Amino acid sequence: MLKVTLDTNCLFDYFERNSEDTKKLIEFQDAGKIEIAVTTRVKADTFGRRKDSPIWQKLQNFPCVIIPTVGRWGVSYWREDMYAGEEDKNIQKTIQSCIGNNPKRLNDVDHLIGHIKAKRDIFVTNDGDFIKHRDCLSQRCKTKIMTPQECVEYINNYC
């Protein structure tokens, strides 16, 4: 089974704009073709903004596996993320060597670290930096990065 990780922006598209591509990915999961996951950093991206975040409330019933990422002081929640070690620092440096070292992008980097550490197959995102630099990320991090539409097409053609 193909293991797909959704970035937070895919969830915003699904919940706020009714994304057909994300709906199709859920259908693929229901049909047993893929397994959808999100990282624990989604909580910081949604719940952390507002305690009554409607996105966070909707996520409680979203059909997915939640995978941990590296813990960060002031961002992570107790018992949800993993302690970071040298391997994690190296993965972060590798990602940042491709997309740049912007401290405001650490949550985005953390999503990809969680995906890589969990040995998942495709990271699905609409993030322009990840898409723009996906060849570098694919080469150096050994993972596929696709937009939701590209992922749907990939699954239709190969699964």
Image: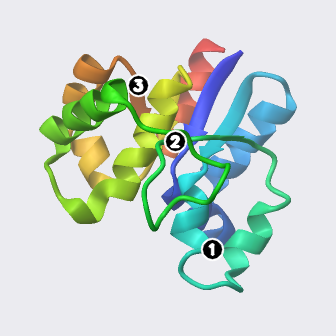
Q: Which amino acid does the dot numbered 2 rest on?
A: Thr
Is residue 89 visible in the rendered image? The answer is yes
| Badge 1 density bin: few <14, some 14–19, many ≥20, Cα 10 Å | some
Q: Residue 63's spot in the image, x, y percent? A: 81, 47
Q: Please report contact status of discs 3 and 1: CB closer than 8 Å, yes or no.
A: no
Element under label 1? loop
Please tell me which of labels 1 and 2 falls first in the chain. 1
Element under label 3? strand
Image quadrant assignment for residue 29: top right
Q: Residue 119's spot in the image, x, y percent? A: 53, 20
Label 2 – label 3 distance at C-alpha: 18 Å
Label 1 – label 2 distance at C-alpha: 16 Å
Q: Which amino acid does the dot numbered 1 rest on?
A: Phe
Residue that appears at 22% across and 43% down: 132
Instruction: Identify the residue position indicated by label 3 in the image.
Output: 144
On screen, residue 79 versus residue 13, left or right, reads right
Q: Which amino acid does the dot numbered 3 rest on?
A: Lys
Q: Which label sits in the foreground, 2 or 3? A: 2
Q: Which mark is residue 104?
A: none
Q: Which mark is residue 47?
A: 1
Q: Please report contact status of discs 1 and 2: CB closer than 8 Å, yes or no.
A: no
Please tell me which of labels 3 and 1 falls first in the chain. 1
Q: Nearer the viewer, residue 4 or 20?
A: 4
- Split into 4 quadrants, where in the image is the C terminus? top right
| Badge 3 density bin: few <14, some 14–19, many ≥20, Cα 10 Å | some
Q: Which mark is residue 69?
A: 2
Q: How is the image coloured?
A: rainbow
Label 3 – label 1 distance at C-alpha: 28 Å
